[in-house]
Image (cartoon, rainbow, N blue to C red):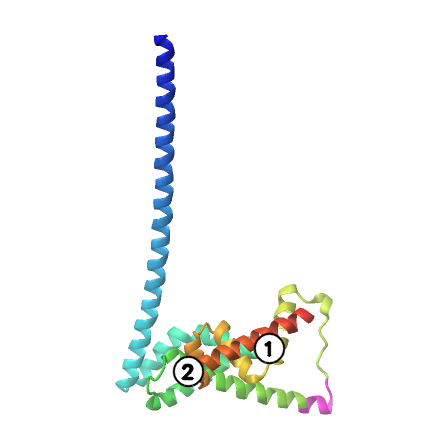
């Protein structure tokens, strides 16, 4: 009888020990997830703070009239996202690089008129938007004139195109069929990563209008791509 009670007691102790270890492991796992989430949140805030600090530094340089250093800081901070924006508009790496340079030079010339009414990033992307718009319009006119004479451009063989390239071409074609104002808004929002407020600033409209333009563009893009 005593031996039986001892065995029962040992079983209870073992289950209690297992339950305790399980509870400790669960708390440890929760603590680990919480620590990872906290680190991620801190990293995100740190990255955002760094971008904000860089923007303020550039604005201070412009305000102080140090345009050369401001241009250098703009190039370091925004050349890559500007390149992605120009690439989205043109579909050409070589053209996008030239347009980024043109954007930065135009910004340098416009520094004396900068009034810091929006973020410096939105201001730069507004310049890029206008330059890309003019560029694509001129290119379309030039290509149209060439087709009137004789179109000797090689036709792409669809069977030889990579899947990613085909998707990119379809997306660019769908973008080209949007209204220019809607195309600019959706490219600024998603390719350039601007907030709706910055899109509004870059396009010279209010935030509500920017949201409507992006929303309409997405609806038309989904319908267009879904039909193909």
In this figure, what is the number of numbered marks? 2
Tell us which disc is closer to us: 2 or 1: 2
Task: Give the x, y percent position of residue 96.
Answer: 52, 78
Q: In the current view of this chain or complex, which residue is farthest to the top?
A: 1
The image quadrant that residue 157 belongs to is: bottom right
Q: Where's the C terminus, which quadrant? A: bottom right
Pick the front one: 1 or 226: 1
Residue bearing the label numbered 1: 175
- Residue at 65 percent across and 87 percent down: it is 143
Q: Considering the numbered disc 1 on the image, is that residue within a helix, a strand or a loop?
A: helix
Q: CA distance from mark 2 to mark 1?
A: 21 Å
- Residue at 58 percent across and 89 percent down: it is 138
Pick the front one: 118 or 155: 118
Where is 103 relative to 47, above or below?
Answer: below
Where is 73 relative to 4, above or below?
Answer: below
Q: Considering the numbered disc 2 on the image, is that residue within a helix, a strand or a loop?
A: helix
Asked if the magenta segment contains residue 38, the reply would be no
User: For this view, does 181 lie left or right of residue 45?
Assistant: right
């Amino acid at each position: 009888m005593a031996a039986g009670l001892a065995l029962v007691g040992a079983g209870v102790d073992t289950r209690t020990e297992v339950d305790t270890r399980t509870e400790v492991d669960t708390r440890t796992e929760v603590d680990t997830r919480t620590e990872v989430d906290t680190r991620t949140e801190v990293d995100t805030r740190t990255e955002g703070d760094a971008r904000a600090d860089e923007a303020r530094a550039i604005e201070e340089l412009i305000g102080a009239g140090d345009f050369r250093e401001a241009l250098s800081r703009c190039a370091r901070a925004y050349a890559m996202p500007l390149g992605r924006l120009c690439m989205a508009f043109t579909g050409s790496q070589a053209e996008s690089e030239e347009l980024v340079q043109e954007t930065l030079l135009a910004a340098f010339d416009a520094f004396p008129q900068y009034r810091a009414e929006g973020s410096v990033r939105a201001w730069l992307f507004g310049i890029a938007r206008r330059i890309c718009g003019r560029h694509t319009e001129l290119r379309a006119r030039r290509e149209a004139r060439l087709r009137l004479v004789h179109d000797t451009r090689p036709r792409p063989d669809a069977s030889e195109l990579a899947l990613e390239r085909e998707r990119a071409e379809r997306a660019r074609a769908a973008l080209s069929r949007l209204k220019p104002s809607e195309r600019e808004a959706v490219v600024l929002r998603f390719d350039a990563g601007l907030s709706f407020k910055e899109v509004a600033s870059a396009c010279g409209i209010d935030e509500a209008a920017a949201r409507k333009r992006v929303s309409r563009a997405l609806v038309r893009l989904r319908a267009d791509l879904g039909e193909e």
